[in-house]
Image: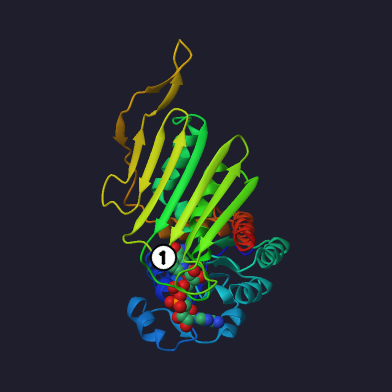
Amino acid sequence: MNNNFSLALIGCGKWGLNHLKTATKLFGEDLKLVCDLNSNSKNTVKQIAPFVSFTTSIQEVIQNKKINSCIVATPASTHFEIGKKLLQNGKHVLIEKPMTLRSDESRILAKIADENNLILMVGHLLLYHPAINEIKKIIKDDKIGQLQYIYSNRLNLGTIRTEENVLWSFAPHDVAILQYLTDSYPIQITSKGASFLNKNIEDTTLTMFSYPNNIHAHIFVSWLHPFKEHRIIVIGSKGMLMFDDVEKQNKLKFYSKGFNYSELGSLEKFDESEITIPYSAEVSPLEEELKDFKNSIKLNKIPIANSKHAIEVLTILEEAERNMKNA
Ligand SMILES: NC(=O)c1ccc[n+]([C@@H]2O[C@H](COP(=O)([O-])OP(=O)(O)OC[C@H]3O[C@@H](n4cnc5c(N)ncnc54)[C@H](O)[C@@H]3O)[C@@H](O)[C@H]2O)c1
């Protein structure tokens, strides 16, 4: 495996711009080339990173032997074809979420990456969020006891998409978090959706999950909500956690709340204290994600947002979608 790090960014639209800024900050001139079909992007790229070359041709990226690593931030429908070409030409690849639109396509990409000893990872940004990592640590350290229920609300009066429903637009992040926190695979998935604005494109979905060991979860996502809510609640037998990403401060709270059997055998509520858990809020999830990409290449290690994880998330979304359409 070529362990050098020489990077190209493909797709420099709304989100790709964040990659450009972050990669420039972290890697400087190791970012060699930006490719976007839209030649108007060139000016913006040159303003942010004057030393970077610009092209509208993906062939130029593929044929550039000095470039061994690529970030793909083009629309989801292009991820499979672009990812395949890059991997077949020996490049390590970080593809934005969703890795592909179908899990079998991601399986193909993972196979090509494995056969050629290349890193393939997905932009599941929240796995690099310091609060999510703090929650994972608290669960692992047994501070909330046996995991019982997790739910995530991702609601906003946001951009209404016409190519994908709200499940595929919002829930990949939440499914990724459920997989990361439970470290297991759901044994049952049921989903209900409703379409109000575009026929057959659900703008509101509620998906329920049962995991082994009596762990349950749900994800509620909607474009039709009067205010922005990004909230994750984790319930354990000894305590509960709330992460509220809309709050400016004190986003992560621990509640010492729950029920115990009393000496007489009845259920009694215990202590109700509530404390804010500090975490390193200055850590940028996108910086952590890009550092993981580079380190995985340098050290030949498996990234946190690896292809196996990406395939699991897509398979779960597909099952939820099937269940919803058959309901
Ligand atoms: N991780 C996150 O939190 C997060 C957030 C937003 C978007 N995204 C993902 O990032 C990706 C891009 O989203 P966006 O909102 O930036 O879209 P966008 O439409 O703003 O930008 C896409 C860019 O890709 C370019 N492009 C399209 N086809 C191309 C090709 N074949 N070769 C080169 N360039 C091409 C377009 O010209 C455009 O500039 C999507 O997969 C989206 O889901 C991830």
- Is 319 rendered above or below residue 150? below
Most foreground residue, 38 or 179: 179
Q: Residues within 10 Å of mark 1 (few under 14, many from 20)?
A: many
Most foreground residue, 114 or 67: 114
- Whether residue 55 appears in this view of the structure is yes
Image quarter where the C terminus lies is bottom right
Q: Residue at x 58, y 67 (%)?
A: 93
Q: Secondary structure at mark 1?
A: loop
Display coloring: rainbow
The three-letter amino acid code for the residue at tag 1 is: Trp
Q: Classify residue 308 by image quadrant.
A: bottom right
Would residue 301 appear left or right of 229 to someone viewing this image? Answer: right
Most foreground residue, 3 or 206: 206
- Is 47 rendered above or below residue 217? below
Q: Which residue is mark 1?
A: 223
> Residue lying furthest bottom in this view?
39
Would residue 142 appear left or right of 44 to someone viewing this image? Answer: right
- Is 215 rendered above or below residue 222? above
Q: Residue at x 58, y 70 (%)?
A: 68
Residue 108 locus on image (x, y percent): 70, 66
Q: Residue at x 42, y 60 (%)?
A: 286
Q: Classify residue 88 by image quadrant.
A: bottom right
Would residue 192 appear left or right of 89 to someone viewing this image? Answer: left
Most foreground residue, 82 or 325: 325
